[in-house]
Amino acid sequence: MRSVKIAVFASGRGSNYEAIYEAIQAKRLDATVVAVVCDKPEAQVIQTAMAHGIKVLSIVPNTYTNKKAYEQAILTFLHEQQVEFIVLAGYMRLIGETLLQAFPRRIVNIHPSLLPYFKGKDAIGQAIVANAKVTGVTVHYVDEGMDTGEIIAQEGLMLNPTWNRETIERYVHRIEHQLYPETLQKIFRKLGKIG
């Protein structure tokens, strides 16, 4: 079985990156993280990935003349690392045409709600404001919209009215950290890359 070379895009702490990395180490995910791309130079995920010996591209969007130039710089880096598949893990930017065309149906995202509900930023906060009785996690293909791509997998979470935000986030992360590696493994098998 051949492992798929993936790049993880993240903007923050990188807990989903860590879950993916751990699943690979535990041989539950036939992939190799060959690159991490981060748009926030202060993000913790950069230090974590570097400690794992992974090549990191820390790239600030507003230092480029436009989105195309920014994504072209990322694309050059991805080609250098021979990346086959992009995994968004808390990457807080919309993916544009340059990357979408280079990786057709090879970019996935994880979102902390049951899409199509609570798209965009702070989905957990949106669920709290809406007094939602259920939320969850969605893994989906990425298109040019905000959390509008084809849904691959979902898992729900019944919300207890006594839970505060921190508790909800803990349960959502627990689902994410299991669902994402499992779903990626299924995708890679379908791609015919392994097994």
Image: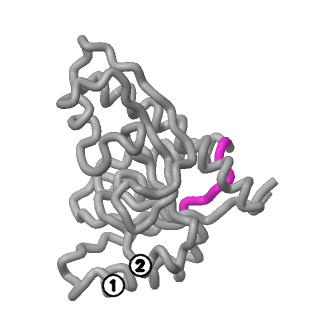
Classify the position of the N terminus by image quarter: bottom right
Vertical position of residue 177 compared to residue 10: above or below = above
The residue carrying pointer 1 sits among few (fewer than 14), some (14 to 19) or many (20 or more) residues within 10 Å by Cα, namely some
Separation (CA) of disc 2 from disc 1: 8 Å
Q: Give the residue type at disc 1.
A: Lys
Location of residue 149 with respect to 157 vertically, above or below: below
Q: Quadrant of residue 135?
A: top left
Q: Residues within 10 Å of mark 2 (few under 14, many from 20)?
A: some
The numbered mark, 2 or 1, whose residue comes first in the sequence reads 1
Q: Which label number is shown at residue 68?
A: 1
| Whether label 2 touches label 1, CB < 8 Å | yes
Mark in the foreground, 2 or 1: 2
Check if residue 12 falls in the magenta segment.
no
Q: Estimate the x, y position of residue 193 in percent, counting from the top left.
A: 75, 62
Which residue is painted at 47% across and 57% down in the image?
149
Q: Name the amino acid type tagged 2.
A: Glu
Q: In this picture, which residue range is highlighted in magenta?
A: 28-33
Question: In terms of image quadrants, where is residue 116?
Answer: top left
Residue 122 x %, y % = 24, 43
- Element assignment for label 2: helix
| Tag 1 secondary structure | helix
Q: In this view, does 188 lie to the left or right of 124?
A: right
Task: Please tell me which residue is depicted at 28% across the width and 51% down the height of the picture.
Answer: 120
Q: Mark 2 points at which residue?
A: 97
Picture coordinates of residue 85 (x, y %)?
A: 57, 66
Q: Is residue 32 found inside the magenta-colored segment of the image?
A: yes
Residue drawn at x 35%, y 52% is 90
Numbered tag placed on residue 131 in the rendering = none
Query: Which residue lies at the image location 43% right of the left edge and 81% below the top edge?
Result: 98
**Who is closer to the viewer here, 109 or 20?**
109
Total of numbered circles in the picture?
2
- Judge whether residue 114 can be spotted in this image: yes
